[in-house]
Amino acid sequence: MLNGLWLGFFLVAAVSALAQWLVGGNAGIFAAMVESIFAMAKLSVEVMVLLFGTLTLWLGFLKIAEQAGIVEWLAKVLGPLFARLMPEVPPGHPALGLITMNFAANGLGLDNAATPIGLKAMRALQDLNPSSTTASNAQILFLVLNASSLTLLPVTIFMYRAQQGALDPTLVFLPILLATSASTLVGLLSVAVMQRLRLWDPVVLAYLVPGALLLGAFMAFLGTLSATALASLSSILGNLTLFGVIVLFLVVGALRRVKVYEAFVEGAKEGFDVAKGLLPYLVAMLCAVGVLRASGALELALDGIRHTVEWMGLDTRFVEGLPTALVKPFSGSAARAMLIETMQTHGVDSFPALVAATVQGSTETTFYVLAVYFGAVGIQRVRHAVGCALLAELAGVIAAICVCYWFFA
């Protein structure tokens, strides 16, 4: 899948460049494309320097949380809920703890760190699966919720914005929180309909209703604020939450007699190992996206979407942020490259860049997650997993666009 997508970027760019040369007489297009390749290769290294630090930092803190028992506590707290949503998983099964750790890593925005944990969870669920090739209900629910990308603290998005010189990297905190809540809710509801899950069960309602009411009340409060106040509140909450999580992990770890420094270093080493393998993928995708942009092919596609949106009588400012949404179902690295390229082209705090950042934080790589997670356990029949995951992703994109107009327009 990634092979075809990456090759397609170059082939489309080549066709577009030839058309501009032969038809438009633009002989300088090839020089611009070559220049873009080297510029993006340089940018990849610059981004990786900060990415090394971010992953190393947060996996260090996550290790403290794990040794302090915070992750285990979360597994116990969520146990009754998972018992209703995944009735085929026995109480106390290791899969529940792994699923909780995966959600925790995703919630902290550590998508690259969440993947290996998620693979372990999928293998644990496969041990309970009566079929070796057909996805079980529990596996589908886990995958769709994973693909819906519930991101409570999108630290990697903050990192990308900081690297590109954003005045306030956490400005998109609240928009991402609202958009990712929409994608997760739609993902859960779609799976519940397909699997006939009893969401009206008293235990399930005890978990979901307070959260839904709290989110609704919070959105009603946000509706009373001006755009300036919304942006300011997002900044304050983003920074406060980020530092609060760090302090919480350290304090609980210290109270539980965890050697927090040693635990941090142990987790940081894992973060370093995860990060060092990302550079080749980042170089590959950023260079491909750079060539696509320099060839004029990407702008041509966006022009088509822009004309359609204008014909419908809608505002077109969000269109420049759509490249991230268009490739996100197929590749996280391609979407990451599109996000960085949008920031570079339009400015890190421009409306298209804010839309792209919110989309990046509120949706997941549906087909990539399907291929990796199900492929790791030999699943061939995915049943309703694709439809539910794509529906959740579409909800996340639409919500991201709407929330950005609410906050930043």
Image (tube, rainbow, N blue to C red):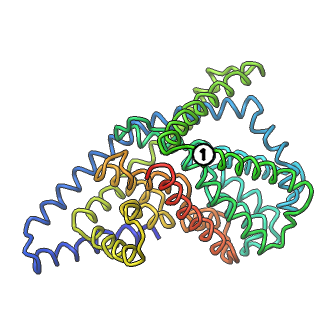
Question: Amino acid under label 1?
Answer: Thr
Q: Is 271 on the left or on the right of 96, as rendered?
A: left
The x and y percentages for residue 16 are 22, 75
On screen, residue 68 above or below 381? above
On screen, residue 353 above or below 237? below
Q: Looking at the image, which is closer to me, 104 or 359?
A: 359
Q: Which residue is drawn at 65% across and 57% down?
A: 146
In which quadrant of the rendered view does residue 126 lie? bottom right
Q: Residue tagged by mark 1?
A: 224
Q: Looking at the image, which is closer to me, 188 or 257?
A: 188
Q: Callout 1 environment at 10 Å: few (<14), some (14 to 19), or many (20+)?
A: few
On screen, residue 322 above or below 178? below
The x and y percentages for residue 250 are 67, 23
Taking the view exactly as shown, the residue that stands out farthest to the bottom is: 23
The x and y percentages for residue 141 are 73, 64
The x and y percentages for residue 168 are 43, 35
Q: Is 143 on the left or on the right of 58, as rendered?
A: right
